[in-house]
């Protein structure tokens, strides 16, 4: 009987042990299942948005909830500066927190970013790595914390930390393992969001720049005369026409022409040293000064001297070559001043083509006390003067050979009988045919002034 009781006791003990083992396995299995579900939930939540700010807020909320913590933060790495920063900080002190920068290696977060190791700290204030830089700003005491690196494609892109376990408890090693597990999907989602954010900012910047360029182009073209101009006298007339083609959306070439009194025609062609919006602004100021300062009793040299004083700045690297003239339609007398520009061509009615020589000055904006000289020439009835920028003569073909002065000279001789519109069209087409598809880096501008018999 005693033997039977002993056997029964052994059987009960064995059954109990098996049951305990099974229960332990069941609890472990349940814990693993719960952990897997938490990871799955975290993955779903952090992949619910591609917007970086929304994602950061989602990460902080999810991490606090999963880890049963009071707070959570994500601190990103600024590789260029070797610092950590808060891209998103909530609460009343959020703006102040976003101003905080931690050096890599500074504080617990900096140490994690530097070493790539996770930490569990039971008493933050007693840890040698502790930095109170953030806590002082937000007046938030940190008792304990977990801090793990956010690693994507082998690179640390930030640090995830959770602060203060609820119910005055301490974080466990299992908590740290769980946070390390959820950091992987968080890091992947965060890098995607950061890439998307950078792309979105680049796209918006590009769209904004394109919009600004369109506006700048409209403003620039708005300064230029749209139609040809005729100035007439009872015995003669002057006809003016121009063409311009920027190498970019906004170029640096400019021209202008307008009547001065009854018998005189002012005209100018220039080339700003730079391109784009700065050149357009410099051009706009130059053209405004030219038109605003020119007076009937002022010579071209006096005009450029006055405009140059206004344009010159010690710290500016911007300048503009310019040629401007005043033609007396009735007499053919031409007074002109040259601020370092390409020499114009005189095309005579008899077929002679010659460069217009004269005393040159420096480009506008180079020297504040520059005095520009006046030169004089004569345009007979049927004569023509052709102004151009170096986008014509310095246009290059695929072998980097330039169009040059000799080709321009020959083209002008061939177009003796051409109208101004025909000359402009054929000259530019000849330059393009010479370039043969080679990309040009400079603007093209041409201005033509004819003096002819009055027959209106």
Image (tube, rainbow, N blue to C red):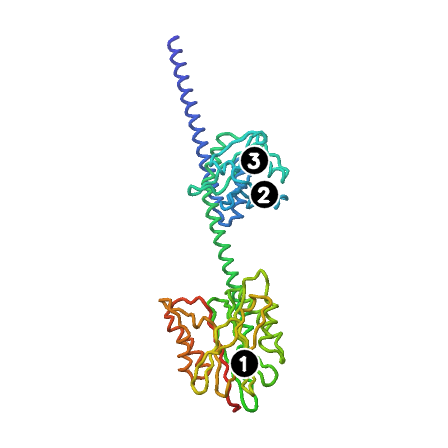
Rounded to the nearest angstrom, the CA distance separating label 2 from label 1 is: 68 Å
Dot 1 falls on a residue whose secondary structure is: strand
The residue indicated by pointer 3 is 163
Residues packed near mark 1 inside 10 Å, few (<14), some (14 to 19) or many (20 plus): some
Q: Earlier in the sequence, mark 2 or mark 1?
A: 2
Quadrant occupied by the N terminus:
top left
The spot of residue 456 in percent (x, y) is: 53, 90
> Do the residues under discs 1 and 3 have CB atoms within 8 angstroms?
no
Q: Is residue 247 visible?
A: yes
The residue indicated by pointer 1 is 376
Dot 3 falls on a residue whose secondary structure is: strand
Viewer-side residue, 308 vs 182: 308
Asked where in the image residue 143 lies, by quadrant, the reply is top right
Rounded to the nearest angstrom, the CA distance separating label 1 from label 3 is: 84 Å
Asked where in the image residue 324 lies, by quadrant, the reply is bottom right
Dot 2 falls on a residue whose secondary structure is: loop
The spot of residue 25 in percent (x, y) is: 42, 27
Residue appearing at x 47%, y 42% in the figure? 187
Label number found at residue 387: none
Residues packed near mark 3 inside 10 Å, few (<14), some (14 to 19) or many (20 plus): many
Residue most extreme to the front: 359
- Count of numbered circles in the view: 3
The spot of residue 30 in percent (x, y) is: 45, 31
Label number found at residue 100: 2
């Amino acid at each position: 009987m005693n033997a039977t009781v002993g056997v029964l006791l052994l059987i009960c003990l064995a059954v109990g042990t098996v049951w305990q083992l099974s229960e332990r396995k069941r609890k472990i299995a349940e814990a693993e299942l719960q952990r897997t579900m938490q990871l799955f939930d975290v993955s779903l939540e952090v992949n619910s948005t591609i917007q970086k700010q929304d994602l950061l807020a989602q990460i902080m909320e999810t991490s606090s909830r999963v880890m049963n913590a009071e707070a959570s933060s994500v601190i990103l790495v600024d590789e260029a500066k070797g610092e950590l920063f808060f891209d998103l900080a909530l609460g009343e002190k959020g703006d102040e927190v976003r101003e905080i920068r931690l050096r890599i290696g500074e504080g617990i977060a900096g140490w994690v970013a530097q070493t790539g190791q996770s930490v569990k700290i039971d008493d933050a204030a007693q840890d040698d790595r502790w930095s109170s830089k953030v806590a002082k700003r937000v007046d938030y005491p940190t008792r304990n914390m977990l801090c793990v690196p956010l690693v994507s494609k082998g690179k640390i892109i930030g640090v995830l930390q959770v602060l203060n376990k609820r119910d005055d408890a301490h974080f466990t090693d299992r908590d740290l393992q769980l946070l390390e597990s959820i950091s992987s999907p968080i890091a992947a989602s965060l890098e995607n969001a950061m890439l998307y954010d950078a792309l979105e900012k680049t796209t918006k910047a590009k769209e904004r720049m394109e919009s600004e360029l369109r506006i700048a182009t409209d403003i620039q073209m708005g300064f230029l005369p749209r139609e040809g101009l005729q100035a007439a006298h009872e015995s003669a007339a002057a006809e003016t026409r121009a063409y311009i083609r920027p190498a970019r959306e906004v170029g640096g070439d400019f021209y202008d022409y307008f009547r001065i009194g009854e018998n005189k025609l002012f005209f100018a062609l220039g080339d700003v040293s730079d391109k784009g919006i700065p050149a357009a602004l410099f051009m706009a100021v130059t053209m405004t000064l030219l038109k605003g300062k020119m007076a009937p009793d002022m010579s071209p040299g006096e005009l450029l001297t006055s405009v140059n004083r206004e344009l010159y700045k010690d710290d500016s690297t911007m300048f503009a070559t310019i040629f401007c003239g005043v033609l007396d339609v009735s007499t053919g007398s031409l007074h002109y001043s040259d601020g370092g520009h390409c020499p114009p061509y005189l095309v005579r009615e008899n077929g002679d083509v010659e460069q217009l020589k004269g005393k040159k000055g420096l480009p506008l904006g180079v020297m504040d006390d520059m005095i520009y000289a006046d030169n004089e020439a004569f345009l007979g009835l049927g004569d023509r003067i052709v102004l151009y920028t170096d986008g014509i003569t310095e246009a290059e073909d695929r072998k980097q050979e330039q169009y040059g002065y000799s080709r321009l000279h020959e083209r002008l001789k061939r177009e003796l009988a051409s109208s101004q519109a025909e000359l402009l069209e054929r000259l530019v087409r000849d330059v393009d045919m010479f370039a043969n598809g080679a990309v040009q880096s400079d603007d093209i501008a041409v201005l033509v002034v004819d003096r002819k018999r009055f027959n209106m």
